[in-house]
C-alpha cells in the first residue's frame, strides 16, 4: 500500500497524485514536491488515501520532498503578492505590440528563476520578441503557455450554476470529452444557460453523472411503453431517472407519477437514439 495525496502544483498548475512517505501532509497544506520541471511548490487538495500498489497507474507518482517551511511559505506569499503586477506588465507589452492574445494569469516558480504566463488566442501567436522583452524585465526565464477556454475557466475559477466552486478548479485533473447526448440522457432542457458552463462549453458535471443515469435508465421502461400500475393500464409519457419513477397517462386523462418498481411493462417500445450507448 502507498500513501497518495492530490497536489495542485503552483497556483494554476497540474493536479496530480504524489506519494507521501514520512511527511505529515494533510488537506490544504503547502509542500515542496518533485515535478517534471524540477522542485516546485504545491497545495494538497485532498486527504491522504491508502492505495494498493497494483492499482497505481504508470508513471509512478512522484514524491513529496517536505512540508513547506517558514522560508518556503514566505517565498510563496511574496510570489502571490507580486503576481498581479507581473501580469499587468505583460499585458502592457502585449497591448503595445497589438498582439491578438488575452493574458489570463501569471505565476512565479518557487525560486523566481522562471515566470509562466497563460494566455488564450484564436490561433497561433508568434511571441518570440515578447519573450525576449519579458526576460529583460523580470531577469528570469519566461514561459508563455497557450490554453483553451476550459483551461481558462480552471485557472480563473468561480462558481458553477450549482453554487459550488467549479469542478475544474476544485478537483479535476483532466478534461474528459463531453457531448450533447449526455444532457439528453439526463433529460435536461437543451437550453445553453442550463447545460453550458462559464467557459462556454458543456458542463463537466454532465460527464460525472452520465454513468449513473445510464445504469439507472436500464431499470426503467421506455417512453411510450404501455404499462400496468396499481391505478390501472396507461402509457409512459415521461421518466424521473433520479427518483426512479415513471409518469403515466391514463385513458381517462389522469396523469400519475409512480415508482418504477410498481410498474409492469405490457408493451414496450425500442429506446430512441438518445438512449443508445
Image (tube, rainbow, N blue to C red):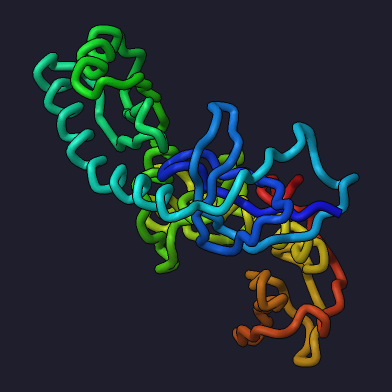
Left or right position of 29 against 104: right
Image quarter (top left, top right, bottom left or bottom right) of the N terminus:
bottom right
Up-down: is 74 above or below 146?
Answer: below
Left or right position of 3 against 100: right
Residue at horizontal 39 percent and vertical 24 percent from the top: 146
Image quarter (top left, top right, bottom left or bottom right) of the C terminus:
top right
Left or right position of 117 against 51: left
User: Which residue is more in the foreground, 59 or 199?
Assistant: 59
Left or right position of 113 against 277: left
User: Which residue is more in the foreground, 103 or 248?
Assistant: 103
Residue at horizontal 14 percent and vertical 21 percent from the top: 93
Where does the image place residue 243, in percent across and percent down from the top left? 67, 78
Residue 27 lies in what quarter of the image? bottom right
Where does the image place residue 112, in percent across and percent down from the top left? 35, 32
Up-down: is 160 above or below 175?
Answer: below
Where does the image place residue 231, in percent across and percent down from the top left? 75, 91
- Residue placed furthest toward the bottom: 231
Up-down: is 6 above or below 217?
Answer: above
Residue 192 seen in this snapshot: no
Up-down: is 19 above or below 110?
Answer: below
Residue 155 lies in what quarter of the image? top left
Residue at horizontal 26 percent and vertical 17 percent from the top: 135
User: Which residue is more in the foreground, 128 or 215?
Assistant: 128
Residue at horizontal 19 percent and vertical 21 percent from the top: 137
Where does the image place residue 104, in percent across and percent down from the top left? 29, 36
Amino acid at each position: 500500500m502507498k500513501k497518495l495525496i492530490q497536489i495542485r502544483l503552483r497556483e494554476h498548475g497540474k493536479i496530480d497524485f504524489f506519494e507521501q512517505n514520512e511527511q505529515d501532509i494533510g488537506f490544504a497544506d503547502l509542500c515542496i514536491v518533485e515535478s517534471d520541471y524540477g522542485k516546485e511548490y504545491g497545495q494538497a487538495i485532498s486527504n491522504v488515501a491508502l492505495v494498493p500498489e497494483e492499482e497505481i497507474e504508470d508513471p509512478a507518482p512522484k514524491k513529496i520532498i517536505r512540508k513547506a517551511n517558514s522560508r518556503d511559505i514566505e517565498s510563496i506569499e511574496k510570489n502571490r503578492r507580486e503576481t498581479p503586477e507581473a501580469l499587468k506588465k505583460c499585458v502592457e507589452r502585449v497591448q503595445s505590440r497589438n498582439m491578438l492574445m488575452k493574458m489570463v494569469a501569471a505565476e512565479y516558480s518557487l525560486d523566481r528563476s522562471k515566470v509562466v504566463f497563460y494566455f488564450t488566442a484564436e490561433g497561433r501567436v508568434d511571441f518570440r520578441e515578447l519573450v525576449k522583452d519579458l526576460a529583460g524585465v523580470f531577469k528570469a526565464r519566461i514561459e508563455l503557455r497557450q490554453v483553451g477556454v476550459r483551461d481558462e475557466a480552471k485557472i480563473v475559477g468561480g462558481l458553477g450554476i450549482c453554487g459550488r466552486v467549479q469542478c475544474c478548479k476544485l478537483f479535476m485533473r483532466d478534461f474528459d470529452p463531453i457531448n450533447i447526448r449526455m444532457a439528453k440522457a439526463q433529460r435536461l432542457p437543451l437550453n445553453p444557460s442550463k447545460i453550458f458552463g462559464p467557459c462556454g462549453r458543456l458542463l463537466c458535471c454532465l460527464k460525472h453523472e452520465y454513468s449513473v443515469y445510464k445504469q439507472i435508465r436500464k431499470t426503467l421502461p421506455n417512453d411510450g411503453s404501455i404499462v400496468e400500475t396499481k391505478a390501472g393500464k396507461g402509457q409512459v409519457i415521461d421518466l424521473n431517472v433520479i427518483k426512479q419513477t415513471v409518469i403515466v397517462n391514463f385513458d381517462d386523462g389522469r396523469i400519475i407519477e409512480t415508482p418504477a418498481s410498481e410498474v409492469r411493462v405490457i408493451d414496450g417500445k425500442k429506446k430512441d437514439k438518445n438512449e443508445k450507448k
